[in-house]
Structure formats: structure tokens, C-alpha cells
Amino acid sequence: MSVLILRVNEMSVLMKILLIVVIALILFRIYFIFLEQQSLYYPAMEVLETPADIGIGYEEVSFKTVDGENLNGWYMPVKDARTTVLYCHGNAGNICHRLHKVKFFNEMGVNFFIFDYRGYGKSSGRPGEKGLYSDAIAACDYLMSRDDVDKSKIVMYGKSLGGPVAAEVCLRRKISALILESSFASVLIRAQQLYPFLPMKFLITQKYDALNKIKDIDIPKLIVHGRNDEIISFSHGQILFDAAAEPKQFLPFEGGHNDEVYVTSPEYKEKLKKFLLQVITKQ
């Protein structure tokens, strides 16, 4: 009898240990999902400036996603523009923190459309991978609905987190060209670089897998990445370029993740002009 009681007690202890381990794993999983969300998205709600503050005329627009979110954006047409750039920004701030991009593309003589993802700026909702893809598709559909936009000459431009978002649009809509600036190959690859001791493949919930997307995108592509990028290492740009289907071009520049390529790389503006001209003339 005493032996049986001892075994029952041993099983009880093992069950308690197992229960503690299971609870610990569940709590870690919940914490990791929270950490993942906080690491990927840094939205700012208040729009402090507009293109008018830097002397550029613009149209503030709103449009809906298929799941009912209201998104906000700025459209800046240029007289006699031959192409339109649809810009998908990175994970922090909102569109008012991209006025340097507004100025840059305005001076290049192209139409420029920039919008805020759900949960950013004046856009409703909460950010997430599926939602951001839906947002970019809605932005593209809005552009294509305008009578003053040549639907055959829309170029997707994605910076950082916006890279895989822009790539997703190219898979689902007819786009003329794709430009990726300082983008990562995938969240998984970046996470494995940061936490090589954790089974990241089983932990991450948001993939943003630009690497697999770019293999199936057959339109012209320009991949731009800083050699000294301290957030998304230069290797990501090289991985994306190597995996990309032709036609493709790679433009490395000296600088970090938040350095503006057209400032740190004098050749960028000319290279971009040449790239856009090639896209336009081939259609």
C-alpha cells in the first residue's frame, strides 16, 4: 500500500511539473506575440505636417479596405507626369514623417501617392500582416480608379517593412515595376539573426516573406540597400537580389537604415530616373 501511495505522489508531482511547464510555455507564447507586435509596428497617430508645409500641392484622400477600414493618404500629381509611384512606408511614424520622400519624387516629376496603414496616422484599425497587405491593395485599387492616373504605369516602392507589402501588391495587381529600399528578406531570417538560440520558425506569427514573393515577380525590379544598415543588414538586400527573377538591378549605397539614399548616394537619383525611364519606354 505504501508503495502505491508513493507512486501516486510521484505521479502527482510529475503532473504538477508538467502543468507548470505547459503554463510557462503558454505565457511565453503570449509574451512573444506581444513582443513581436511591439517590435514590428511603431505607429504615430498625429499628423503634424502636410506637403503644403513644404510648398507642394496635394490632395488628401480617404478610401476603404475590403474589410471596412478607413485609410488616409496624400496624392500629389505632377503636370505631364509619365508614371505614378505608390509608396509603402516603414514601420514607424506615419506619412507626415515622409515629407522628404514627397519632395524627392515631386522634384523628379512623377505622380506620388503615399498612404497610412491601418492604425497609423488618421487610418482606422490595428496593424497586422494580413491587414497591411489589404491596405496596400486598397491603395493600389484607389489609384487605378482615378481617371488622371495611367493604370499601365504604376510603380510600387517599398521601404523597410513596406518592401514585402509592395511586393505583395505586385503579385496581386498588374504593376509596371517594383523598387525595394532597405527591405528585409523575411521576418524569419531577421529574427533568426537576432535570436539564433530560439526556434523562431515556430514562434513568429507574421512572416512578411519578401524572399518568396520576389521569386515570382517578373516585372523590372530595383533593389536598394545600405552597406552600413544597422537594422536590416546589407545581406538582406543581397539575398533579395540573388533570389529575384529577371529583370532586376541592384544598387548598394553607403549609409545606414535611416540614412536617405538620395543624400548618401549621389548616383541614386540618376539611377532611379534611368530605371523609371526604362520602365516607361518598354510599355
Image: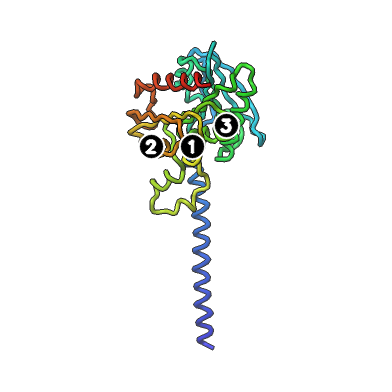
Residues at discs 1 and 3 in contact (Cβ within 8 Å):
no
Residue 204, placed above or below residue 210: below
**Placement of 12 over or under 241, stated as above or below:** below
Residue 90 in picture, x, y percent from top left: 48, 32
Query: Residue at 38% across / 22% down in the picture?
Result: 268
At label 3, counting other C-alpha atoms closer than 10 Å, the crowd grade (few under 14, some 14-19, many 20 or more) is many
CA neighbours of label 2 inside 10 A, class few (<14), some (14 to 19), many (20+): some
Q: Secondary structure at mark 1?
A: helix
Residue type at mark 2 is Gln
Report the residue marked by disc 2.
238
Residue at the spot of label 3? 136
Tag 1 residue: 214
Secondary structure of residue under mark 3: helix
SS at mark 2? helix
Query: Split into 4 quadrants, where in the image is the N terminus?
Result: bottom right
Label ID, residue 67? none
Distance from the alpha carbon under mark 2 to that under mark 1? 13 Å
Q: Which amino acid is tagged 1?
A: Ile
Q: Position of residue 173 (x, y in %)?
A: 59, 31
Give, as a three-letter code, the residue at label 3. Ala
- Give the camera-side residue of 268 and 31: 268
Query: How far apart are the alpha carbons under marks 3 and 2?
Result: 25 Å
Q: Nearer the viewer, mark 3 or mark 2?
A: 2
Q: Residue at x 41, y 29 (%)?
A: 249
- Residue lying furthest bottom: 1
Q: Nearer the viewer, mark 1 or mark 3?
A: 1
Residue at 34% in and 28% down: 253
Q: Earlier in the sequence, mark 1 or mark 3?
A: 3
Q: Determine the residue positioned at 51% across, 14% down.
A: 56
Label 1: few (<14), some (14–19) or many (≥20) C-alpha neighbours in 10 Å: many
